[in-house]
Image: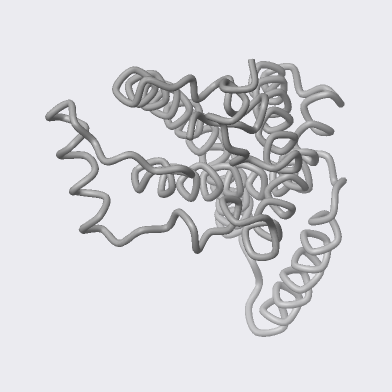
Amino acid sequence: MSNIKNSEIRVWDPMVRLFHWSLVLTFLISYFTGDEENLLHIYTGYAVLGLIVFRLLWGIIGSRHARFSDFLYSPKKVIEYIKGLLSGKPQHYVGHNPAAGWMVIALLISLFVASISGLKVYAVEEGKGPLAGLTTEFSLISSANADDDDDDKEHDEHGYNDEKGGEKEGDEFWEELHEVSANLTLLLIFLHVAGVIVSSKLHKENLVKAMITGRKNA
């Protein structure tokens, strides 16, 4: 039993593991409650954004393998790793491998876009959330500009409809961006899981278990 323990090393600290599984849970709940427009979707969206902020901070001041400097490799290293993966003999890394490292960044970006666009939709449609104040301010500015234009020329019905049409197109843009970024995140998750399965098999290690226990074989 002691030999097994001695052959393992600690890689993922508790904060990384808590972040990882919390993000999995909150994103899935938020994704599958998106069409219902309920409070659970909104609160889990806030949670996702909070987790992103934490991971960015922890990627700077966290433990060795949690820091971005440990797993963000050059494009050359990423290509070399993928070639090794395709040949069945990839180089082994204690922390994230080069491909997984950039997958982390891609997921954080797509999740951030989904969160911000979701807040924008919430502000526009419900008038709530941290961006609601900005939306109201911009609306007041637009109204003031419209009043100034009225002094120069009278708006006809067609012009009024154009303004409303522009606002509607803006709303649709944020809704579409929110949906696309959420679906992109789901796709990236599938790719991430596939990569974990392949890497676990080729490196003969259980990466899912490692993200639970924090340990890998030495």
- Mark count: 0
Q: Position of residue 41 (x, y in %)?
A: 77, 26
Which of the two residues, 166 or 87, is positioned nearer the viewer here? Answer: 87
Viewer-proximal residue, 38 or 32?
32
Question: What residue lies at 79% left-to-right and 56% top-to-bottom?
Answer: 131
Q: With respect to residue 163, does 176 lie above or below?
A: above
Looking at this rendering, what residue extends furthest in the left direction? Answer: 87
Q: Position of residue 15 (x, y in %)?
A: 75, 43
Residue 97, image x, y percentages: 38, 43
Residue at horizontal 35 percent and vertical 58 percent from the top: 73
In the picture, measured across the screen, residue 93 lies left or right of residue 189, that is left
Which image quadrant for residue 160?
bottom right
Can you tell which quarter of the image residue 19 is in?
top right
Between 8 and 114, the residue placed more toward the observer is: 8
Q: Is residue 216 above or below residue 77?
A: above
Q: Is residue 199 left or right of residue 106?
A: left
The residue shown at (83%, 39%) is 126
The quadrant where residue 201 appears: top left
